[in-house]
Amino acid sequence: MDWNDVRYFAATYRAGSLTGAARMLGVSVQTVGRRIDALETAIGSTLFVRHSGGYTATPDAEALMAEAVQVEEAMASFRARASGRAETISGVVRLAAPETITTHLLLPALPAMLSQYPQLELEIITGIAPVGIARGEADLALRLVPPDHGALTVRRIGTMRHGLYAGAGSIPDLAASRLVGWTDDHDLPASRWLYRLAGRSADLRFNHLEAHRAAIVAGLGVGILPCFLDPGLSRLPCTLLMEEPVWLVGHAAAEMSVRVRVVYDEIAAIIAANADLLTGRRGTREQLGVEETL
């Protein structure tokens, strides 16, 4: 079996289609299809059910995905060690990332890397405003919108799905509920999704996602949150598939230093390991009834 096929399997599992997997990996749809066929032949099992809407993972694929994540993490560690050796990796790496992803997903997973490279320093810049890699404002950026210019390495490493939420134990009528959303100066997908669902703007507006969640937890209203923030909340039935790609951006590969590559690989592995949480496959209280895609 070709170990590279694990990458193609994991990408198809996360994307749910050959087209999405090809986009994530930067290869053709035909290449992904051939690799998946070869992997299924090698292991003697059907991993995906093919249909007009994409590829649906079989129980065998679900069982193997956890192993695939471990392989990805092991390969990232191997590349880091082979490219520079731990003792030579030192200095500052500046990472720009959304604060909630940083707080809930990245920080809890970073101790192992920082223990392995004790001379490595991290400077993490959080916030909504994009930080320019090409302008030298950061070495790496975890973004929900890809950059449209610059000699950069741009890789889609995951998908972040959102849901419509209310306080724990409540399933309120959306039409009669207060709506929790972003302030008017933030033109974000969540604002447009909320307006499309409710036909009106938010009644309680914040400029910080953690404040959104706190308001919903307190029972002040109904709002849209990333699925990985949903523990303790009730997820309401929703007719829209609300999701955003997660992009990892860095300098062109040839210009990326060893220490930056170590952090780059680690961030990609962390997001991959949390794919089910980010897409709402794990940790949700209600199931999303999807009828259309934005």
Image (cartoon, rainbow, N blue to C red):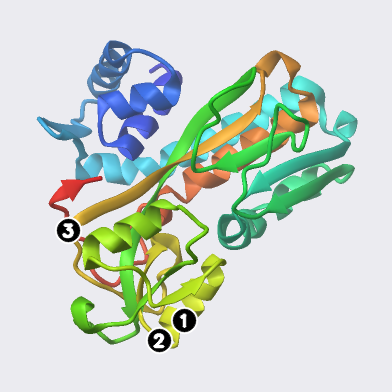
Q: Position of residue 58 (x, y in %)?
A: 19, 41
**Residue furthest out toward the left:** 52
In the rendered view, tell whether residue 232 sits above or below residue 151.
below
Q: Position of residue 45 (x, y in %)?
A: 20, 30
Q: Quadrant of the C terminus?
A: top left
Measured from the top left, where is residue 85 in percent x and y? 82, 27
Q: Is residue 12 positioned above or below 236 on the image?
A: above
User: Does residue 170 sit above or below 204 in this rendering?
Assistant: below
Image side of residue 129 versus residue 71, left or right = right
Front residue of 156 and 41: 156
From the viewer's side, name the closer residue of 81 and 278.
278
Q: Nearer the viewer, residue 271 or 210?
A: 210
Q: Amino acid at mark 3?
A: Thr
Which quadrant would the N terminus be assigned to in this image? top left
Q: CA distance from mark 3 to mark 1?
A: 23 Å
**Amino acid type of the residue tagged 2 in the rendering:** Leu
**Residue 215 disc label:** 1
**Residue, disc 2:** 220
Q: Amino acid at mark 1?
A: Ala
Name which residue lies at 66% across and 18% down: 252
Marks 3 and 1, the one that precedes in the sequence = 1
Q: Which mark is residue 239?
A: 3
Disc 1 to disc 2, C-alpha distance: 5 Å
Whether the residues at callouts 1 and 2 have beta carbons within 8 Å, the answer is yes
Mark found first going from the N terminus, 1 or 2: 1
Q: Is residue 184 left or right of residue 73?
A: left
Query: Residue 240 shows which numbered tag?
Result: none
Packing grade of label 3 (10 A; few <14, some 14-19, many >=20) is few
- As helix, strand or loop, the secondary structure at mark 1 comes to helix
